[in-house]
Image: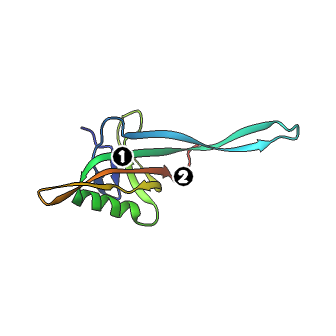
């Protein structure tokens, strides 16, 4: 299975079943022309990453949450939507849904439904 995400040198487990998305999002502004007509002006494009994982081991979950909850930007190596090869850029955490405790197996916790959204900091033309 290919590596999808590395955040601040932390390897994020590869997820399956359409739980990883990486796509371009346009940054645009709505402008009102003198005539009253509304137009949208595209100012740039950023990458957006949407990730969720069903059942994650306790140690890995704590490591991933630690890096996501840390303030500031994150250096992310990600697999773009064309699936070619890893690309590196700087991202911010746009949203983070904390996981819930699913169950214990052999005394170790398993966490359910960790999900987050990352947004690239610098737009492209």
For this view, does 44 lie left or right of residue 60?
Answer: right
x, y (%) of residue 73?
A: 46, 61
Q: Which mark is residue 18?
A: none
**Which badge, 1 or 2, comes first in the chain's sequence?**
1
Rate crowding at label 1 as few (under 14), some (14 to 19) or many (20 or more) other CA atoms within 10 Å: many
Q: How far apart are marks 1 and 2 (CA)?
A: 24 Å
x, y (%) of residue 16?
A: 30, 38
For image coordinates 11% across by 57% down, the residue present is 106
- 85 in relation to 102, above or below: above
- Quadrant the N terminus occupies: top left
| Foreground pick, 98 / 27 | 98
> In terms of image quadrants, where is residue 58?
bottom left
Query: For the residues carrying marks 1 and 2, which lies nearer the camera in this image?
Result: 1
- Quadrant the C terminus occupies: top right
For image coordinates 44% across by 45% down, the residue present is 49
Q: Name the residue under label 1.
A: 52
For image coordinates 56% across by 48% down, the residue present is 123
x, y (%) of residue 35?
A: 88, 37
Q: Mark 2 points at which residue?
A: 122
For image coordinates 36% across by 46% down, the residue present is 52
x, y (%) of residue 66?
A: 34, 64
At mark 1, the secondary structure is: strand
Coloring scheme of the render? rainbow
* Residue extending furthest toward the front: 103
Number of numbered tags placed on the structure image:
2
* Residue extending furthest toward the right: 35
């Amino acid at each position: 299975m290919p590596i999808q995400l590395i955040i601040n040198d932390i390897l994020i487990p590869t997820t399956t079943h359409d739980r990883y998305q990486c796509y371009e999002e346009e940054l645009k502004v709505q402008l009102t022309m003198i005539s009253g007509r509304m137009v949208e002006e595209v100012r740039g494009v950023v990458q957006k990453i949407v990730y969720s994982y069903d059942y994650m081991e306790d140690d890995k979950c704590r490591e991933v949450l630690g890096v996501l909850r840390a303030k500031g930007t994150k250096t992310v190596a990600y697999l773009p939507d064309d699936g070619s090869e890893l690309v590196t850029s700087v991202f911010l955490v746009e949203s983070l849904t904390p996981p819930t405790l699913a169950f214990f197996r052999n005394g170790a916790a398993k966490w359910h439904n960790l999900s987050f959204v990352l947004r690239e900091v610098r737009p492209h033309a």
